[in-house]
Image: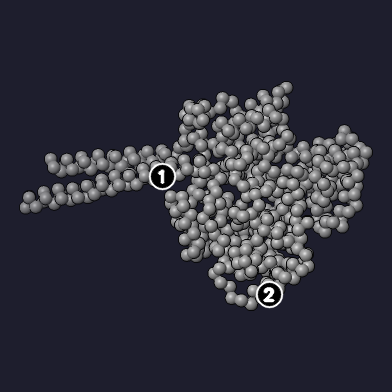
Amino acid sequence: MKFLAVRGHACWTLMLGMVFLAQLSVGRRSKPKPEKGSLRGVEALPEKALLVELEEALGNGQRMPLQGRRLTEMEDELKTTFKALPKNSRGAVEGASARYALHRLFLKRYGWQIKGLETGGGAWDAESPVGAMGDRVPPKMRELFEERLSTYGLTLHELAVLGATMDNMFRSDVSARLQIVYKAYSRSENDILSLNDAIDFAYAYMCSFIIGSRVASLHTTEVHLNVRRFKHQFPRHQEVENLLMSTMRDVAGSNEEFNNELMTSWLVAFGERLGSFEDRECKVMKQKLVEREDRLGSGRVRLGHFYSDKEHFSEGVDYLRRIGALDESVADDPKVIIPNYLASPSNCVLPSGYYGICCFDECEQLMDRIESHFEAPMASPSAMALFVSSLPSASQPVNRTLSPKLLQLLEDVAAHHGGMVPIHGRLFSQWMHQAYPRECSHPHLTASDESFFDGSFMHSWEGSLANFEEKVKYMSIASSMSNKTDTDDASPTSMWSMEEQLVDPKNFAEEHARAGSSRLRRVMAMVALGFAGLYMGQALPRQKFGKSIKEL
């Protein structure tokens, strides 16, 4: 009877452990289910699909031009980041995370910095991403997006709808600039252009797009002026002309007549490809900077060595400091931070008042891999270190050994957040800069919080170029410092600070709590199974051997 009691107790313990495991498995597989009144006191599920509401808001039977391939592409490209971002109880992202995801989408897709999506160093929740639409969509549409975002958050599909709407509105910018070109040549948008005229018009558009004024201030006289001066002002004019013509062949095929719609489609595609074209120059600049690094792999160039290339680098100290591209942790030996400099406004083309075409961010590819691997807003420091050590870049090998200092910094980030590392925050971005100094920017606390598009910030570098005396001064300093032995004070970690700024702190805290609860259930389940095994292991052999001895 004693054996049966022990065996019964073990079975009950085993069953309890299995229940815990089953609950744990269900919790891991299922998404949070929204409840009525769970989100700001309203029903957590909207009554109508977002596209339906948008078409109703447009009225007159209009349909949103978002169905099909473009929307599907947007959804596919957003999926990885969406899965990893903190979400509300509906499983949707709220304003800050939506803004962050869309900023990264356009930066990866086209090399675009979008007014209202980039932060200029500010908080992600400072503005709604809907603000980036400005007055380029009907007010009812903006209000609908804002209401959906603030009340329910956005699912992956809804976020893709917002992204596709923004993507589509840039077509109106192309159309507006093209209308000015038509007027400059005394033609109408209703005219059918011959192949030769279409090429001439597209060339005039391209010249004004790259070196001309923003579309809001562009006038017909300037269109002709831009055509005349383009080859003198843009050294790579032949390459970009080739891009224009190759885009035409891809879009128009063998067409020899061009209406306004076909011209617009051609120039929209050209604008989307220009980012990749400009990024070639970014890679040339990066190579020149890497060749001048103060120490191999540091991601930093002494200011004097930066000025030694007169063709590419001439921004003044005040400007470099303002954009967060200057490392002054050693006061008498300032250095330019390579990825921060490449991301600066002086390396962007600004064809419009609401977006700029900039260098592609190499850190985006690394972040994509991290998000794809973890599919969560956070990871343990050990898991993150293991994965990053296997994650190669242009400058880091696969399966490298992370330094003890780098591992300790990651532990510090985790300790700051109760044992887990948030993927979407300033501290992890700072750590990624330490791990990939040439690819990932350092998130300065002292960088300007101005937007690229505030006042003359985008082109302010033109008035703050280093003068001859300034260049000579820093070249002399660089020469003297090159003869000294580098100390640990000069390493990138000397800029480290423990000030955090999460993309979505509220929903991260809730995700963190859910993850902690899941870990607790896992521990309880394993303890229960352990006790079951202990009882079974002790009771069964004792009963068996006791019976054998008695029979003897």
- Is residue 454 shown above or below 490? above
Which residue in the structure is indicated by mark 1? 516
User: On the rendered image, what quadrant is the N terminus found in?
Assistant: top left
Q: Where is residue 143 in the image (x, y as percent from the top left)?
A: 65, 30
Regarding mark 2 in the picture, which secondary structure is present there?
helix
Quadrant in which residue 173 is drawn: top right
Few, some or many residues within 10 Å of mark 2 (<14, 14–19, 20+): few
Residue drawn at x 15%, y 43% as measured from the top left: 3
Few, some or many residues within 10 Å of mark 1 (<14, 14–19, 20+): some
Which colour style is shown?
one colour
Q: Where is residue 226 in the image (x, y as percent from the top left)?
A: 87, 50
- Is residue 423 shown above or below 475? above
Which residue in the structure is indicated by mark 2? 479
- Amino acid type, residue under disc 1 in the picture: Gly
Residue drawn at x 63%, y 50% as measured from the top left: 121
Front residue of 19/502: it is 502
Give whichever of discs 1 and 2 has the lower sequence position: 2
Can residue 521 be seen?
A: yes
Q: Position of residue 377 (x, y in %)?
A: 51, 46
Q: Position of residue 332 (x, y in %)?
A: 64, 69
Front residue of 548/151: it is 151
Q: Distance between the residues labelled 1 and 2?
A: 53 Å
